[in-house]
Amino acid sequence: MQTLADLLNTIPAIDPAAMSRAQRHIDGLLKPVGSLGRLEALAIQLAGMPGLNGIPHVGKKAVLVMCADHGV
């Protein structure tokens, strides 16, 4: 049986060069730098994932809207 530590050691490292390219690309877009907040950081992390060559592909896209009225 594989331990969690063994499993974590099999995860490849991120690609800092791809993340840097993504950062430069996002900062060069026609918008204020940092205006997309956490979405920019997420895009940069996705770009650094091994095997994506800095271009994350999102297959089936979906929008999930959840709401409630429970007094909180």
Image (spheres, rainbow, N blue to C red):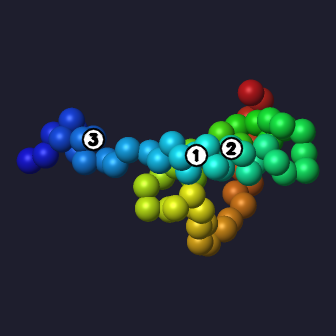
Q: Quadrant of the C terminus?
A: top right
Label 1 element class: helix
Q: CA distance from mark 2 to mark 1?
A: 6 Å
Q: Which residue sits at x=38%, y=44%?
A: 13
Circle 2 crowding by C-alpha within 10 Å: few under 14, some 14–19, many from 20: some
| Residue 48 shows up from this direction | yes
Q: Are marks 2 and 1 in contact (CB under 8 Å)?
A: yes
Label 3 element class: helix
Circle 1 crowding by C-alpha within 10 Å: few under 14, some 14–19, many from 20: many
> Which residue in the structure is indicated by mark 2?
23
Q: Nearer the viewer, residue 10 or 63?
A: 10
Quarter occupied by residue 69: top right
Image-based side of 11 in relation to 64, left or right: left
Of the two numbered discs 3 and 1 in the rendering, the one whose residue sits closer to the viewer? 1
**Residue extending furthest left?**
1
Q: Is residue 20 above or below residue 61?
A: above
What label sits on residue 8 in the rendered view? 3
Residue type at tag 3: Leu
Q: Is residue 55 above or below residue 23?
A: below
What label sits on residue 19 in the rendered view? 1
Label 2 element class: helix
Q: Nearer the viewer, residue 70 or 59?
A: 59
Q: Is residue 51 above or below residue 25?
A: below
Residue type at tag 2: Gln
Q: Position of residue 61 (x, y in %)?
A: 66, 68
Q: Position of residue 71 (x, y in %)?
A: 77, 29
